[in-house]
């Protein structure tokens, strides 16, 4: 086999994603359940999964904490009609994991309707065998050009 062909095959094998393991599957499922909890206003679930030192960098660049976000969820302001993830990639590093992907949200903030496409990065930590959300960062994606 030509050495360039071998190098190309080796590069492809190294860059190809391996089958997701149980931790990656668990993080993907947890990220989806967190999105569902935001949409449904399930503060009890989010309270159970947010790490004690959880932080959130929101779409306006403000950094909020666990208490602030749980209060918003309890008040349902913002109220989400849509909150779905797509294109989620997960990388596990021992007892920490990073999930990144896209999120589509729509709803109301006060009386103001909104609809946004976002890019998110979530950081999870495993404490006593349980995955917790330690940090999330969301960035609005530009509106498609017409």
Image (cartoon, grey):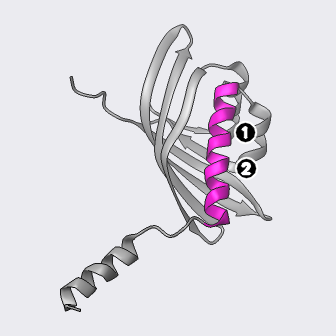
Where is residue 18? Give x, y as percent: 50, 70
Q: Earlier in the sequence, mark 2 or mark 1?
A: 1
Residue 30 x/y as whole percent = 67, 48
Q: Is residue 29 magenta?
A: yes
Can the viewer see residue 109? yes
Identify the residue at horizontal 46%, vertical 18% (top origin).
114
Nearest the viewer among 126 and 146 is 146
The residue drawn where x is 22% and y is 84% is: 5
Front-lying residue, 76 or 27: 27
Q: Is residue 83 above or below residue 50?
A: above
Indicate whether residue 92 is drawn in magenta: no
Cα distance in 3D space between marks 2 and 1: 11 Å
Q: Main secondary structure of the magenta part?
A: helix
Q: What is the span of residues highlighted in magenta in the rendered image?
A: 21-40
Q: Quadrant of residue 20?
A: bottom right
Quadrant assignment for the C terminus: top left
Above or below, comparing residue 39 to residue 98 in the picture: above
- Which residue does the numbered mark 2 point to in the structure image? 52
Q: Which residue is mark 1?
A: 46
């Amino acid at each position: 086999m030509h050495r360039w062909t071998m190098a190309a095959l080796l590069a492809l094998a190294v860059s190809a994603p391996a089958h997701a393991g149980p931790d990656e599957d668990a993080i993907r499922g947890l990220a989806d359940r967190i999105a569902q909890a935001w949409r449904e206003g399930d503060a009890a679930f989010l309270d159970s999964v947010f790490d004690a030192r959880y932080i959130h960098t929101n779409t306006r660049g403000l950094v909020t904490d666990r208490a602030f976000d749980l209060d918003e969820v309890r008040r349902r302001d913002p109220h989400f009609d849509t909150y779905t993830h797509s294109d989620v990639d997960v990388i596990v590093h021992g007892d920490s994991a990073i999930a990144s992907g896209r999120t589509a949200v729509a709803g109301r903030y006060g009386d103001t309707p909104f609809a946004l496409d976002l890019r998110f990065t979530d950081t999870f930590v495993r404490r006593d065998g349980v995955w917790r959300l330690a940090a999330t960062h969301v960035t609005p994606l530009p509106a498609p050009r017409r």
